[in-house]
Amino acid sequence: MKILVPVKQVAVLDEDFELRDDGLDADPDFIDHESNEWDDYSYEAALQIMEAHGGVEVVPMTVGPEDAEESLRRCLAKGGERAIRVWDDALTGAGPATVAKLIAAVARREGADMVFAGTLSADHSYAMTGICVAAELGWPHVAVVTALEYQPGAATATVHRELEAGLVEKMTVECPAVLTIQLGINQPRYASLRGVKQAKEKPVDELSPADLGVSGEELAASASFRLRRMFKPARGQAELIEGTAAEQAARLASIIKELRGAA
Amino acid sequence: MMLVDALARVVAGAVQRADPFLAAAAYAAADEEGRGRLEPVLLASYRLKRQFAEAPFTPPAVLRRLAGEPDRRIRLKVARHPAAPPEVLRQLAREVACVEILEAVARHRNAPAEVLAGLPWREHPGVRDALCWNPRAPVALLRALIGTAPLPAQKGIASNPNADAALLARLWESPDPYLRAQVAAHPGCPPAIMDAAERSPEATVRRMLAGNPAASLQALLRLLGDEAAEVRAAAVQGASVSAEELSDLAVDPSSQVRRTEARRAALPAAVVERLSRDPDAWVRRWLGRNRCATEPVLARLATDRELEVRRAVSRNPGCTPALLNRLAMDPDAWVRAGVALRPDIPSEALARLSAEEDPDIASAIGRNPNTAREVLLRIAASGNSDLRRAVILNRAAPRQVLLTLLEDPYPLNRVVLAEHPALGEEDLETLTADPDPHVRFAALRALIRRGRPEPAAATGELTSTDNPGREP
């Protein structure tokens, strides 16, 4: 039984960032990278199933350049024996539908039984990739999963979803399925130092779209939108409270009273 | 000598491994030649320069180097860095072509007075306004600024410790109540203005006057009878008001006033007694922490129905061992944790609480200097990273316990561990090979702090042990 966990190395912008000359993205000089927080939870969910049951393999994968391997090593430091990285320079700037096509191709190649993805990525927040993977595979899916009961090999999984006003929706989904996991479903572990060292030796298979049988034409056809422009919008309604300490306190108190309907 | 060797090995490793975080930590201890070798690692990319120019842990020596970067964006970040040294700000103040840098220098608390006085504020309103708020701006500069400063900047001058009586008198003429309130709160406020402030129809002005440490005793006593509760509460805090003079306020209708009184030192026994029976739990809570609470009062508050009141008693330095033993059996873990935090915890209570698994109690026991080694070892093996950190924060924890935490899975714990005095130099050297860059930085910084070798000595060792062939 195999659980495929797609993870992503996300961009974190410096507060004084500048845009690229083409206006389509931030200048790379102002971007740091880190693992996507949602993926910590999806990977933990998979590891917990692996540890609770025999015969379960968890395989982290990513679609990203060489730098993105760090996210895979971070996963492998917590558990799992191997990882998969898919890349081709032509994939730079690829949208979620394109990435999903490659993740689905890996799932087929690996014979994955389940796919656990993060609900969204912290940088682009499309919240589409997992759902697109399900569409590519023709599998059922449940998004924003906050609790999971699943026995490896079972025909169904029971999941919870949080709705408005704290309402919880409990549902059954047929397996194999794609689940997108929400923050808070578990408490992700930190990798032990031994795990970090061991992860350096674990294999990361590097595949190209061609290795997965996905042609450039197919990838181009999967582009579901075109990025036209990225820009900093005009300032919103936020108020910078200025003045003396007493003046700031008075203004803050009046805002709180206003919000509570007392003024 | 061993320390110097260790430093040299680590620094050589920083260069060999092209580790910018080790390079940043080593930079301060290196001489000119050593720094020259570290710089290609430290400043290898724009991204690294940006990260170090804004990181709160960046050593001043690195900021000094970054202040000379040709990229204006990096220099601006250095000018905004809270740890930017005075000489760096002096250098950056010469950047007359970049208003943003000048504004950052004008706002910076480390900028020397003469540098602030020399900034071109007449040409740049942003520089002028920032100077008004800078507590290091000299009075002569403030006098010059006030002529053109708009109202928001005038408030900065009114709160500036260097503002003199003449400036404050001028600002008092403003119709803005907050500006006048700030003048009334200034320790240099002239007596005539204080008198006028006392009669102000604005409660904010009277309240700020009541909080002024220079307010006269007579004024404070009159303000104790003010119609506004916030004014009376501020007057209660006045150091010159004796506890006896506050007796009547123990029955003040405002809980805000009684809460403030319950925090005062040296309260008369009758006031303590009355406040201890106050219906407001916050009054009893403050009194529970007050050193002047008598033993019988503490004993009664230790049975209060409000958990936070009992917790306050457990933290009161005047608590007797007998009372602490009793609180160690409180039904609520938060109260028992208060006892567990105390360095003077009785042995009976310590033994009882050491066996508890509640996280608040275990955390407090982990930090307690009296805790037995076996107990610390058990807490250090906890799956809860906060509990393990409690042991790391325990300055009395022995090295044998700390060694089990050198491989703590939580990187922040290892960063904190690097500062522990019981770790040996060899332990710190181990941490300089940690996978987390912040741990490596903290470990090398700690090694350097311990040795504080002369720069030439440190770099001399570096030169002799480094492998030039592997330089990046």
Image (spheres, rainbow, N blue to C red):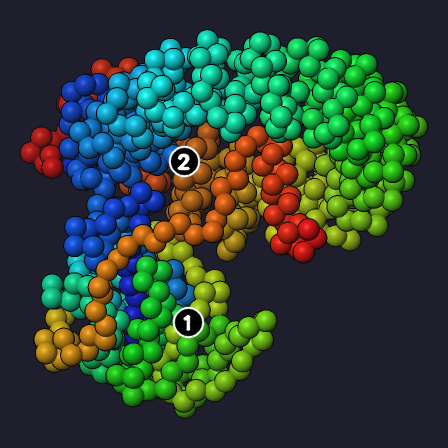
Note whether B56 is above or below A27 in the view shown.
above
**Image quarter of residue B450:** top left
Chain where mark 1 sits: A
Question: The residue tagged with tag 1: helix, strand or loop?
Answer: strand
Q: Is residue B381 visible?
A: no
Q: CA distance from mark 2 to mark 1?
A: 36 Å
Nearest the viewer among B397 and B165 is B165
Q: Is residue B129 visible?
A: yes
Q: Are marks 2 and 1 in contact (CB under 8 Å)?
A: no
Viewer-nearest of labels 2 and 1?
1
Residue type at tag 1? Ile
**How packed is label 1: few (under 14 Cα within 10 Å), some, or many (20 or more)?**
many
In this rendering, is residue A81 above or below B268?
below
Q: In which image quadrant can residue B316 be found?
A: top right
Q: Quarter of the image containing the N terminus of chain A?
A: bottom left
- Few, some or many residues within 10 Å of mark 2 (<14, 14–19, 20+): many
* Amino acid type of the residue tagged 2 in the rendering: Ala
Q: Is residue B45 above or below residue B359?
A: above
Q: Is residue B219 left or right of residue B98?
A: right
Residue B163 drawn at (x, y percent) = 54, 14
Describe residue B132's horizontal placement relative to residue B248 as left or right.
left
Tell me how many marks there are.
2
Residue highlighted by disc 1: A181
| x and y, in percent, of residue B402 in the image | 46, 40
Dot 2 falls on which chain? B
- Image point (29%, 88%), residue name: A138
Please tell me the numbered disc located at residue B418: 2
- Displayed quadrant of residue A243: top right
